[in-house]
Amino acid sequence: MDKTDFLVIGSGIAGASAAYALSREAPVLVVEREAAHGVHTTGRSAALYSAAYGNAVIRALTLASRAFFDAPPAGFADYPLLSPRGCLYIAAAGQAGALAEVEGAAVASGVAMRRLDAAGARELCPILRDGHVVQAVFEPDAMDIDVQALHQGFLKGIRAHGGQARLDAEVTGLTRAHDRWIVSFRDGAEVSAHTVIDAAGAWADVVAGLAGAPPVGLQPKRRTALILEAPEGVAPGPWPAVIDADEQFYFKPEAGRILASPADETPSEPCDAQPDEWDIAVCVDRIQAAADLPVRRVLRSWAGLRSFVPDRSPVIGFDPACPGFFWLAGQGGYGVQTAPAAGRVAAALALGRPLPDDVAALGVTAAMLGPQRLR
Ligand SMILES: Cc1cc2nc3c(=O)[nH]c(=O)nc-3n(C[C@H](O)[C@H](O)[C@H](O)COP(=O)(O)OP(=O)(O)OC[C@H]3O[C@@H](n4cnc5c(N)ncnc54)[C@H](O)[C@@H]3O)c2cc1C
């Protein structure tokens, strides 16, 4: 039987980032059920880095990830991981309070935000409808993320550090014997591991059930994305991402076209999420109310599951009720932009160390992340 110290279940951005950080120090095996990496939520994101987005813990992990994004280790990726985008949070009549909340929370976390009037917002994104936007705040340091490069960089790094990543390897059983886990796979193979890290995305509670760990109450929520044509004769490249202050929709340039979302959060079972016609129609409707964007046809659509626990912070830490079982779940809609820091946090805690200094300095504690807060 193969043996490892850390067996990471799920090779999405969460599992890959943690395995990358751990593999510098210990034997690591990442196992993925699918035939390719990034098939589920990681391959379906909007690829945005906005430090204003999410609760205080998310904002801290996003900010703590920035240095890695800006300067990854030599050889990690062939091109920059981030490219300038900017993010414009807009408010229509009646949304001043929601906009002030976005701004206040971001500024409290040290994120640079600039107030704009309607004219200033339209200068940045000229298709915004006259009369719709009343005020806006602009986050100049928001970026587009090259998600594929980040994910592949982590996976390549794991191998370079002597770790392994296996595809077509679905974990179907977890049994505790002599202070180790016997991990069973669908094809009958078994691996012995000191610690199991549950980075199974929407399936994290299902995997916990295999180990006999109590669930953390993870709720996968479907989110839809579409690709639309840009208005004729218009090059959207320089526009920022535009997000409604109440997060009822967002859109951003994407390779000469427009990526749009109705920002839906429909509860779902863990599954291979598919877009729903209704959500696509809602998206088109909401965006057309805010922007002069004629939609002749939807070029492509997809959906993915963003998985949350009730406080919308990630779950990172050992399960006190299940020795050797470590949670890395609940990345919600922020798992890519937080991955460099969340991976380091997971590695430190899994190795029995305190949180990295830079993350602790931003006010994050192990108790804010651990599964015990949810029980
Ligand atoms: C439309 C949309 C837009 C988004 N936009 C952004 C954004 O702009 N910025 C951002 O930061 N985040 C964004 N997100 C969120 C981000 O994509 C997620 O937070 C992140 O990808 C979650 O990563 P993960 O590794 O936890 O999950 P996943 O990528 O789903 O990986 C989990 C893996 O575990 C595997 N697995 C499950 N069970 C088993 C088992 N028993 N054995 C082996 N393997 C198993 C699965 O096959 C899967 O590959 C968005 C998400 C969506 C859907």
Image (tube, helix red, strand yellow):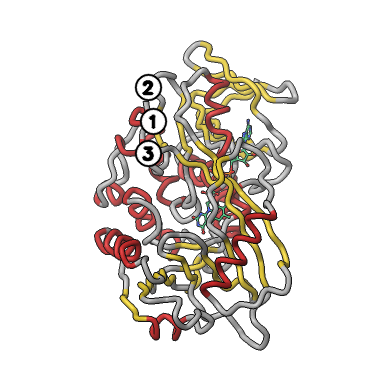
- Marks 2 and 1, Cα distance to the nearest angstrom? 8 Å
Crowding at dot 3, Cα within 10 Å, few <14 / some 14-19 / many 20+, comes out as some
- The disc, 2 or 3, on the residue closer to the chain's N-terminal end is 2
The dot on residue 309 is none
Q: Label 2 neighbourhood size at 10 Å, few (<14), some (14-19), many (20+)? A: few
Instruction: Tell me the kind of residue under disc 1.
Output: Pro
Which quadrant, please, contains the C terminus? top left
Kind of residue at disc 2: Pro
Residue lying furthest top: 178
Name which residue lies at 67% across and 31% down: 170
Is disc 1's CB within 8 Å of ligand 1?
Answer: no
The residue carrying mark 1 is: 371
* Image location (x, y in percent) of residue 242: 48, 70
Q: Secondary structure at mark 3?
A: helix
Query: Is 187 positioned to the left or the right of 23 in the image?
Result: right
State the CA–CA distance, disc 2 to disc 3. 17 Å
